[in-house]
Every structure is written in structure tokens, then in C-alpha cells.
Image: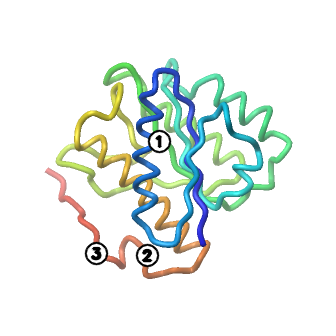
Amino acid sequence: MSKVLVLYDSASGNTGKMAALVADGVREVPNVEVRLKHLDDATADDVLWCDGLALGSPTNMGILSWKMKRFWDETMGPHWMKVDGKIGCAFSSAGGWGGGQELACQSLLTVLMNFGFLVFGVTDYAGKTTTLHYGAVTAREPRTEESQAACRLLGRRLAEWVAVFVDRRHEQHPLVKPTPRLPPG
């Protein structure tokens, strides 16, 4: 059985709401166990346990939160090279559009890559104008159906990749099984 961790920091609760939706998306794929953990309650063992990791942070000045950075520096630092080959993705919320959410996702992905995670973007549209090439992003809480769909899509895609690459369940490959892929424009 595949194991996915949704690990997040959330000051206002908005990123936490995104995390719950990402976890819902993971649950759409059969035979995947999911754990939802706030950063304050997480340990290195949680990251070592998982095959796939969805990492979420509020956007702080266009990058990940200081608490998330500290977790990877101090808690995970001694475990560097022990998580090579795990699969990861990112999500972030900010106070408004243009707050740097995609930059925050890129900073999260950079941290994951430095620890050897295989990271990905999603080419499918979650709505008419919603993409998540760098991860799921929203302004404040995920209120709209499109932002909620983006969070669920990110979680589902993570679970699909983990099922394919870890459990060798090729029928879960997103290009093999029929999934709604909205056309651009």
C-alpha cells in the first residue's frame, strides 16, 4: 500500500484548509494511506514513513514560511540522503493574488529537490482558468470550486504517481486511466 503524507504549516488556517483538500484528493486513489500533519505535530519519522509528500506553506515574502524552512534545516537535516527518490509536490496560499504563491511553491520544491525528492507539476486544468504547474495556489482560503478542485487534483496526482512508481500499479498512470483534462482557452 502506498503512503502519502500531507505536511503543512498554516498560520491563519487557510493553508490547513488546502491541506485537507489535498488529502481528499489522495483518498480518490485506491490503496493509498494518507496522513495529514500540521508542521507543529510532525517529526522526521513522518517524512521517513511516506512514499509521497505534499508540502504546504503559507507564502511569506514570496517564499516558504520560516517554520517550514527550520523544519527542513533542523529536523530533517540529519536525515539528508535518507529520502532520495520519494515523490513530492507543493501548495501555498497568500493574503491575495500576486502575493508570490507560485514562488513559494518553487521554494518548497527546491527544498524537496535538495533532499532528493522527485517533484512534478500538473498539466491538467482544475478549472477553466486554473492550472497548477508549480503546485496548487490560492488567495486566502480555497473558497472557489476551482481552487478546491486544484487542491484535490494535486493530491490525486501525487497518489497516482506514488501508486505507479512505488507500487507499480501502472493502471493508475494519469495518461492511461481516463481523467477529465480540460482544454486550454
Residue type (three-letter) at the residue carrying disc 2: Gln
Q: Nearer the viewer, mark 3 or mark 1?
A: 1
Q: Answer with mark 2 or mark 1, whichever residue precedes in sequence.
A: 1
At x 70% / y 50%, what residue is drawn? 47
> Dot 2 corresponds to which residue?
172
Q: Residue under circle 1? A: 19
Using residue 3 as the reference point, say whether residue 81 is left or right of it: right
Residue closest to the eye, 169 or 120: 169
Among the 4 quarters of the image, the one containing residue 93: top left
Mark 1 residue type: Ala
* Residue 103 in picture, x, y percent from top left: 47, 31
| Three-letter amino acid code of the residue under disc 3 | Pro
92 on left or right of 3 = left
For marks 3 and 2, the one nearer the N-term is 2
Query: Residue 110's x, y, as percent?
Result: 61, 41
Q: Earlier in the sequence, mark 3 or mark 1?
A: 1
Q: Are marks 2 and 1 in contact (CB under 8 Å)?
A: no
Q: Secondary structure at mark 2?
A: helix
Disc 3/disc 2 C-alpha distance (Å)? 10 Å
28 and 118: which is toward the camera: 28
The residue tagged with tag 3: helix, strand or loop? loop
Spatial CA span between label 3 and label 1: 25 Å
Image quarter for residue 96?
top left
Q: Which label was assigned to residue 178?
A: 3
Q: Residues within 10 Å of mark 3 (few under 14, many from 20)?
A: few
Q: Residue drawn 74% across and 41% down?
A: 43
CB-based contact (under 8 Å), mark 3 and mark 1: no
